[in-house]
Image (cartoon, rainbow, N blue to C red):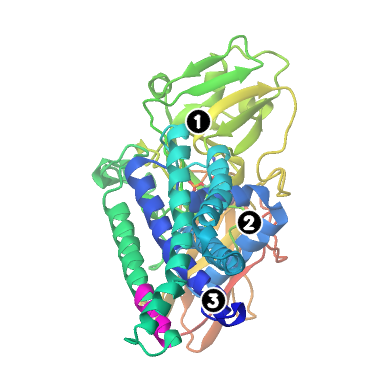
Amino acid sequence: MSDRADASYRPALLLGGLIGVFLTASLIALLYVGWRLAGFSFVPFDTFDWLGRMLPGAFIEFIIGNTVAVIRALHLGPTAAVAKMVEQGIGIFNLLITGVISGIVLFAILRRSGDKYAFPLGALLGIVIGVPAIIISFVAGKTASVAPIFNAVMLFIAFLIWGMAFGWAYRRLNSSRVIQAASETAIVPDRAWAQRIDRRNFLIRLAGTTAVITVAGAFVGMRWSRLRGGQPHTPDQRWSATHSLPNADAAVMPAPGTRPEFTPLEDHYRIDINTFPPMIDGNDWQLKISGLVDQALTLTLDDLRRYETNDQFVTLSCISNPVGGDLIGTTRWTGISLQRLLSDWGVKPEATYIKIRSADEFYEVVSLADIRSDPRIMLTYQWDGVPLTTEHGYPLRIYIPDLHGMKQPKWIESIEFIDRWEPGYWVERDWDKTARMKATSVIDTVAVDSLIKTDGQTLVPIGGIAHAGARGISKVEIKIDDGPWVSAQLRDPLSPLTWVIWRYDWPYQPGRHTFTVRCYDGKGEMQISEPAEPYPSGASGLYSKTQKI
Ligand SMILES: Nc1nc2c(c(=O)[nH]1)N[C@H]1C(S)=C(S)[C@@H](COP(=O)(O)O)O[C@H]1N2
Ligand SMILES: [Mo]
């Protein structure tokens, strides 16, 4: 038999890709179980997060901007939650594709080298893919909670077995000698035919086995996770479960269909640079104070809880929020004024900024002048009367009035006193240096199902929110079609730091209409009507909505 003829029996490259899908799906499932049950790195998330930190800010913004646009255009659900799922999916998909390419490349090499190198080259593949994954997880990964050496050893073994399984599969698919022997006994008349049957059976068995591993792994990992983040709580422990809102008696009631004035915790948007939030054990956690202070010190959560608390109703929004988007929410923040803490920390006169660092390597600076002039800037440990949830920054985050979320680190680990300004994580990636929340207004509802009939007139309640950071809202106006701007009623807000709910009862006119809203901040300054994308300084532009009545 000549070499040429023999070549046609060697496993094709695409078969390598297919084997890649089977083996890598199983690997991902096993890594998932290892992560959820034992605290080993979940490589797909770690590598995705690492890429996110490495790639240029403009590229990341391009991706984020488009993801948000697609989620909104297709009405896929709450932007932040869907985007997080997309990120996680991409992370998993990346490893799967790496597996497919690995399979193709390995099979290409083995077709030339012959299958006696199948195991050593398979092992080499495991090392070539596994070692960088281990290094990334070690350097930048956030998912592992076991000792790094233990983690590295387990990941190494997992990738080594995965690589060698490719070699094994190649040998199995290439077992032409067995087939040839069979054909010579004349049980099977045609060698190529026999090999096809044999390969098909093998592939079906492999597909079945790996599918079982993958599904079982996903199920076990979801069901029996031992991951612990912030302290769990029950909804009835929340402040809002047992208190009425401070503006409960306000004269102006929201138009039916207006978003909740106080955002339920599970509905508050979440944005951060992690596929998976850092899981911090509050009992081990310490806040480290260092730099230009008389003496470096550490504080535990209990130390912090001993200070007098501040409660503030706050509306927070993400700078990536498009006009009318859902990356904005309001809750009750509880913490300690940073001003109060400064006096206990022996700050040296040369200090001008604090640099806050977080468990996910996020960082931002805050000027001491701002802290000294604004007692509302606070280190926050509760939202809605319960410890911060894992996603929202357990155990500690900062609140800075008037600024977008990008300036306000969650999962704070340390505060360093320094004597110069430095760009924070997003500022370094070319987002706005100040990131002040712009005045915005949104129509939530044109409540055609809740018509109000008064003496001879029928009114349609129209309503929504207006927000201008900590600057308050002095006026909201509505325009219907090309009519004049008319003033809406303003509901007393939860606090000067939250959005304001407005409402306008419009005399009913059947037909198709376009409703537009604009607002003025507390100083009487009108919101910017010129449309702008979120990048780099936050979105602007008037919100309008067309609806048939
Ligand atoms: N440590 C850390 N803090 C962070 C971020 C982050 O990625 N890491 N994202 C910021 C951004 S961009 C926003 S909009 C807010 C969102 O807070 P939330 O997720 O609790 O709503 O967190 C901010 N704090
Ligand atoms: Mo953000």
Q: Which mark is residue 12?
A: 3
Which one is nearer the viewer's eye here, 261 or 298?
298
Span of residues in magenta: 193-202
Kindly tell me whether residue 326 is visible in this rendering: no
Quadrant of the snapshot with the N terminus: bottom right
Residue located at (47% from left, 33% from top):
149
In front of the other: 13 or 313: 13
On whether ligand 1 comes within 8 Å of the CB at mark 2, the answer is no
| Type of amino acid at the residue the image marks with label 2 | Tyr
Q: Position of residue 494 (x, y in %)?
A: 44, 46
Q: Is residue 201 magenta?
A: yes
Callout 1: CB less than 8 Å from ligand 1: no
Mark 2 or mark 3: which is in front?
3
Gap between marks 2 and 3 measured at Cα: 67 Å
Which residue type carries mark 1?
Answer: Leu
Which residue is under mark 1? 379
Q: Earlier in the sequence, mark 3 or mark 1?
A: 3
Say whether marks 2 and 3 touch (CB < 8 Å). Answer: no
Q: Position of residue 112 (x, y in %)?
A: 62, 68
The main secondary structure of the magenta stretch is helix
Occupied quadrant, residue 361: top right
Q: Residues within 10 Å of mark 3 (few under 14, many from 20)?
A: some
Query: Mark 2 — residue?
Result: 520
- Contact (CB < 8 A) between labels 3 and 1? no
Query: Distance between the Cα atoms at labels 3 and 1?
Result: 60 Å
Quadrant in which residue 386 is drawn: top left
Where in the figure is residue 109, as x and y percent of width and height? Answer: 61, 65
Q: Are marks 2 and 1 in contact (CB under 8 Å)?
A: no
Say what secondary structure mark 1 lies in. strand
Task: Give the residue type that dot 3 points to.
Answer: Ala
Q: Is residue 455 left or right of residue 371?
A: left
